[in-house]
Image (cartoon, rainbow, N blue to C red):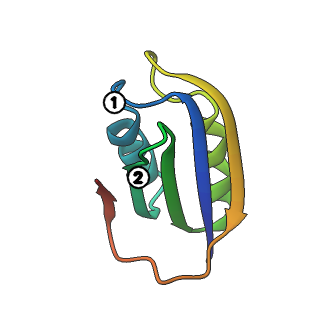
Amino acid sequence: MMSARFLVTGKVQGVFFRASARNEALRLKLRGYARNLPDGRVDVVACGDAAAVDELEQWLWQGPPAARVDDVVRSEYDDDVPAGFAVS
């Protein structure tokens, strides 16, 4: 099991990015969350199988059709990750 945090920059708010990220994370059997940040980025935390976390990262670079992703910054995440995948 591994956990990672992703900060996604671009046109990622108001385009169903968080809901789509949740669907992708659940498909990959990951837990965590996706939330909007006040500066326009989306904060995504994912925990699960390392290959699945890597696959989610690749998806984050594209996002849903209406999104435009400019950057994805990945970092380690050491805090507890609750069950399920929340959107806030």
Residue at horizontal 69 percent and vertical 35 percent from the top: 71
Mark 2 neighbour density, 10 Å: few (under 14) some (14–19) many (20 or more): many
Mark 1 neighbour density, 10 Å: few (under 14) some (14–19) many (20 or more): some
Q: Is residue 62 above or below residue 18?
A: above
Quadrant assignment, res 31: bottom left
What residue is pinned by disc 1?
16
Residue at horizontal 50 percent and vertical 54 percent from the top: 44
Between the residue at mark 1 and the residue at mark 2, the CA separation in whole angstroms equals: 11 Å
Residue 10 rendering spot, x and y as whole percentages: 57, 27
Residue at horizontal 51 percent and vertical 40 percent from the top: 41
SS of the residue under disc 2: strand
Residue 78 rendering spot, x and y as whole percentages: 61, 81
SS of the residue under disc 1: loop
Residue 37 or residue 74, whichever sits in front: 37
What amino acid is found at the position of numbered circle 2 in the picture?
Ala
Residue 4 rendering spot, x and y as whole percentages: 63, 65
What residue is pinned by disc 2?
34
- Residue 35 tag number: none
Q: Is residue 78 above or below residue 67?
A: below
